[in-house]
C-alpha cells in the first residue's frame, strides 16, 4: 500500500512538473523515479487521481489534475510574461543569467519564481534588463535549461 501511495504522489508531482502527453511518457518518468509499473496499473492510478487531458494550445493534449485548469491558465499567463520579456538564457556552473528586454527583468524574474522550479534557490532582478538565477548545489545550467524548455517549449536557444 505504501508503494502505491508513494507512486500516486510521484504521478501528481510529475504531471505538475512536466508536459506529459501520453501514458508512455509518464511510464518513462516513473521508471526513472524507480517505479516498475504496467500500463494497466498506471491507467487505474490515473482514473483514481481523476487525471484528465487538456489542450496544450499547440495541436496536442497534456495530462492535468482536477482543478489544474485554473493553474494551467495562470501558468500560461506566466509563460507569456516570460516569453515577452526574455532575450537569451546563459549559464555558468549553477548561475544562470537571463537577458531581458529593457524594463522586463522584474516580470521575467517573477515568472521564474511563479513557475516554482525545484532547481532554483532564488532570482534577483537587475535594475533593467537582466535576471540572475542561483541554482541549487549540483544542478547544472544544462539541466535547468532542459527543464525550462519542457515548461516553455517556445524558447529558442
Image (cartoon, helix red, strand yellow):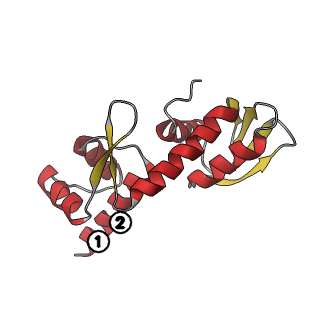
Q: Quadrant of residue 81?
A: top right
Reply above or below: 45 against 76: below
115 shown above or below 12: above
Q: Give me the residue at 22% from left, 55% from top.
A: 36
Q: How many marks?
A: 2
Q: Which mark is residue 9?
A: 2
Quadrant for residue 65, please give it: bottom left
Badge 1 local density, few (<14 within 10 Å), some, or many (20+)?
A: few
Q: For marks 1 and 2, give the CA distance.
A: 6 Å
For this rendering, which residue is in front, 147 or 137? 147
Residue 151 image position (x, y, % from top left) = 49, 41
Q: Residues within 10 Å of mark 2 (few under 14, many from 20)?
A: few
> What mark, if any, has residue 51 been given in the picture?
none
Residue 99 horizontal/vertical position (percent): 75, 32
Q: Residue furthest bottom?
A: 1
Give the x, y percent position of residue 153.
Answer: 49, 32
Q: Is residue 120 visible?
A: yes
Query: Where's the C terminus, which quadrant?
Result: top right
Q: Residue at x 57, y 24 (%)?
A: 156
Residue 123 percent location from the top left of the image: 73, 50
Question: Quick check: can you spot residue 136?
Answer: no
Q: Residue furthest left?
A: 40
> Which residue is at 27% across, 57% downward?
51
Callout 1–callout 2 Cβ contact below 8 Å: yes
Q: Is residue 27 left or right of residue 41?
A: right
Dot 1: element:
helix
State the mark number for residue 5: 1
Instruction: Check the picture and name the quadrant holding the N terminus.
Output: bottom left
Task: Looking at this view, name the residue that lies furthest to the right.
Answer: 127
Q: Element type at marker 2?
A: helix
Residue at the image position 37 percent from the left and 53 percent from the top: 15
Amino acid at each position: 500500500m505504501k508503494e502505491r501511495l508513494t507512486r500516486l504522489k510521484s504521478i501528481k508531482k510529475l504531471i505538475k512538473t512536466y508536459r506529459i502527453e501520453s501514458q508512455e511518457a509518464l511510464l518513462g518518468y516513473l521508471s526513472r523515479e524507480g517505479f516498475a509499473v504496467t500500463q494497466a496499473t498506471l491507467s487505474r492510478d490515473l482514473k483514481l487521481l481523476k487525471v484528465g487531458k487538456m489542450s496544450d494550445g499547440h495541436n496536442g493534449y497534456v495530462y492535468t489534475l482536477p482543478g489544474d485548469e485554473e493553474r494551467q491558465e495562470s501558468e500560461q499567463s506566466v509563460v507569456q510574461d516570460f516569453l515577452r520579456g526574455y532575450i537569451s538564457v546563459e549559464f555558468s556552473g549553477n548561475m544562470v543569467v537571463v537577458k531581458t528586454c529593457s524594463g522586463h527583468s522584474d516580470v521575467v524574474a517573477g515568472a521564474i519564481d511563479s513557475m516554482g522550479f525545484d532547481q532554483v534557490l532564488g532570482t534577483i532582478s537587475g535594475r533593467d534588463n537582466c535576471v540572475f538565477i542561483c541554482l541549487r548545489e549540483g544542478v547544472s545550467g544544462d539541466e535547468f535549461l532542459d527543464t525550462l524548455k519542457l515548461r516553455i517549449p517556445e524558447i529558442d536557444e
